[in-house]
Image (cartoon, helix red, strand yellow):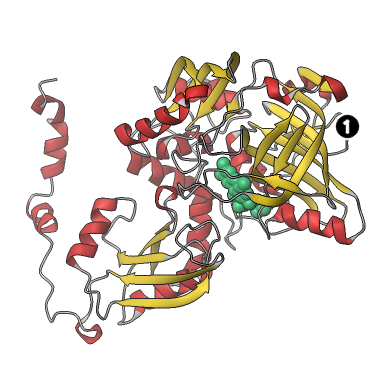
Amino acid sequence: MSTPQPCTTAPALCGPYDSLRDYVAALDARGRLLRIAEMDADRFEPTGFAYRLIEEKGFHKAPAFLIERLKINGRWLEGPVLGNAFPGWDGEALAFGAEPYTADQAKARAAGTQLLEGLLSKDKRWPAIPPETISAAEAPCKANVRLGDDVDLESFAWLQTNPRDAGRYLNAASVFMEDPELGRNVGTYRCQLKGKNRVGVNAEIGQHAWQFIDRARKAGRKSVTAALVIGADPITFAVGTSKITQLGEDELNIAGGLRRKAVQLVKCETSSVRVPAHAEIVIEGEIPVDRMEAEGPYGEVYGYMGLEKPENFFMEVKAVTYRDRPLILNSFAGITKLTLMLAQNVSNKVRYREQIPGLVDIYRPIETTGVTLLSIKKQQAGEGLEAGRVIAEGDIFAKTVIVVDEDIDIHNFTQVFHALGTRWQPHPAAELIESTKGFPLDPSQPQRWVTSKMIIDATRQFPDEGGPAHWPEVSRVLLEQHSPEVFDLVDSRWQEYFGQ
Ligand SMILES: Cc1cc2nc3c(=O)[nH]c(=O)nc-3n(C[C@H](O)[C@H](O)[C@H](O)COP(=O)(O)O)c2cc1C
């Protein structure tokens, strides 16, 4: 296991963080947070800003932003609303506590990946540290407690992100449930604001929360007791948004392992469900299992407006507890980055390495949902397409699978497109799967859940795969071989070239 380096900044600003606000302070200290005094959400200014921010700065270099005050339904509400909360690979490395901090995206990603790979056990499992419970008196999320008729969710600055959305959404709510047999589940689902004490809960079919509710229904129970947590610490939030645990496996054990210290919990006011004590907002209630109601439409992660769901879960809210001036995490789905991705990336690499021995890296970019990229060290003819087949079959999101050689950085889209343009011959290095299971939110599907898939083998084809007898050398490699110091020279004079 690689030992994390000591943090070089003030101890309070070192990751992993106990709360989202500690993390936001650390981003601020490193110039990765933009503070905006106010925005007119009735004119969708936050959403326009989010689009423009990504267009101008790029998906990974865009900073997190905090809007202090917002006009919503004609009145000014106090935020702050937090957008693009986990900016770039540097924001990921910071959250996981990889030090020293670097703004260089490739270096930050490498440092974060190395840290997480070092935490894996010999049999490639995440470490587990069980959560611990503290008293309500010690728990910051109990600073304000509203029960029963005193609950008014409409007074918080939840946003309607798209004009066509069904309304305002708590769109980054981690739903905590405890089941006598299955244990605990933490999953993040969008929740439509439906009134002062009512929210929708959109666990898609098959999600673990959906399975908890389904089991409760089959067991003859009337409702499932749950809590929606807004603004848990970054790692707990990320684990609740990732597929790195099995049904019945406690996400909080893994969150503790990744944090290298236990997640502190506190008991809810109205139930025995326990929630992160340092969360910004906790909403307690019951999800009926025998009653459903309409929910959506909502602008989905693919960047398109989804369908209204005639029947979906909802929660009757009994209590809300929150920190002073709570942060409202807004996901800006389909626009900005939504969560920390490193743990999921490392998990995918570990999982697929068992099936693809030559796998170097695998990446499913959120900004191009539907495309999965992988690089391999190809030894034998056919391995490129074979690797692509494994991913196309194993990953419901992977509609277009692009396989490249190990010298291509799959996080650099220019290099991937360069490989497509220069190394790929569509025939015979492609394979079409005409019909298989697809992710239902993909707007291109004529029939939900059914998709075709394409595997593109953009590795250099060997002669016995139909490739050329001789591949020319790469010009950049020739330069580096001849002048190994060339990029050090240029980097050392970089500021000078620009007159700085
Ligand atoms: C900001 C955000 C919002 C999400 N919203 C939903 C949602 O509305 N419904 C859903 O099924 N999954 C949603 N997801 C994906 C789930 O959080 C993810 O699949 C997670 O693994 C679900 O937890 P589970 O495995 O315990 O079911 C969202 C993810 C993020 C990052």
- 73 vs 383, left or right, is right
Check the image and report above or below for 399 versus 311.
Answer: below
- 317 vs 59, left or right, is right
Find the residue positioned furthest to the bottom.
464
What residue is drawn where x is 80% and y is 54%?
213
What residue is drawn where x is 76% and y is 22%?
152
- 93 vs 459, left or right, is right
Q: Secondary structure at mark 1?
A: loop
- Residue 379, percent from left and from top: 31, 77
| Quadrant of the image occupied by residue 20 | top right
Q: Is mark 1 within 8 Å of ligand 1?
A: no
What residue is drawn where x is 61% and y is 27%?
158
**Residue toward you, 366 or 128:** 366
Check the image and report above or below for 408 versus 115.
Answer: below
- Which residue is under mark 1? 270
- Residue 216, percent from left and from top: 86, 55
Residue type beneath disc 1: Thr
- Residue 203, percent from left and from top: 68, 50
Q: Is residue 127 visible?
A: no
Q: Is residue 161 visible?
A: yes
- Residue 199, percent from left and from top: 73, 36
- 496 vs 169, left or right, is left
| Quadrant of the image occupied by residue 449 | bottom right
Of the 4 image quadrants, the one containing the C terminus is top left
**Residue toward you, 123 or 272:** 272
Check the image and report above or below for 302 versus 165.
Answer: below
Is disc 1 surrounded by few (<14), some (14 to 19) or many (20+) residues within 10 Å? Answer: some
